[in-house]
Image: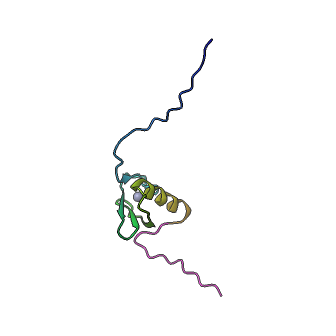
Amino acid sequence: MGRRRRKTTPKRPVRTIPSIFNCPRCGRNAVRVELNRNIGQGTVHCGNCDVQATITITPLTEPVDAYGEFVDICATQPVTSSKTPNSRVSQE
Ligand SMILES: [Zn+2]
């Protein structure tokens, strides 16, 4: 009677999470996450393509969470870097 036991133990690799991530834009491993818990803001910045995003963080926010938000932002809207966003469309 071959009983199959499914082990559903989630393998969680315990390792220190680096605060350098892959850039969703340029693909380089150059995204640095800085969490300013004092002001409740995190800055995610790619040192390669210079894309940057400021996100709101909570005391529970980890760098990887901030990075996730950053990826989200990059996916949903064009993130401007050095250029000033000229997205002020005044419609009459
Ligand atoms: Zn980049």
Quadrant where ligand 1 appears: bottom left
Residue 79, how many percent across, how many down?
48, 66
Residue 2 sits in quarter: top right
Q: How many marks?
A: 0
- Hey, which residue is sitting farthest top in the picture? 1
Relative height, residue 62 to residue 85 (above, below): above
Q: Main secondary structure of the magenta part?
A: loop
What colouring does the structure picture have? rainbow
Q: Which quarter of the image is occupied by the N terminus?
A: top right
Relative height, residue 42 to residue 65 (above, below): below
Q: Which quarter of the image is occupied by the C terminus?
A: bottom right
Query: Which span is picked out in magenta?
Result: 79-92
- Hey, which residue is sitting farthest front in the picture? 59
Residue 14, how many percent across, how many down?
37, 40
Q: Is residue 37 magenta?
A: no
- Hey, which residue is sitting farthest right in the picture? 92
* Residue for point 41% across, 64% down: 51
Residue 31 sits in quarter: bottom left
Relative height, residue 31 to residue 81 (above, below): above
Residue nearest the observer in this picture, 82 or 43: 43
84 sits left or right of 30 in the view: right
Residue 48, how many percent across, how many down?
36, 59
Residue nearest the observer in this picture, 16 or 76: 16
* Residue for point 35% across, 53% down: 19
Residue 24, how many percent across, how many down?
46, 55
Residue nearest the observer in this picture, 36 or 77: 36
* Residue for point 37% across, 71% down: 39
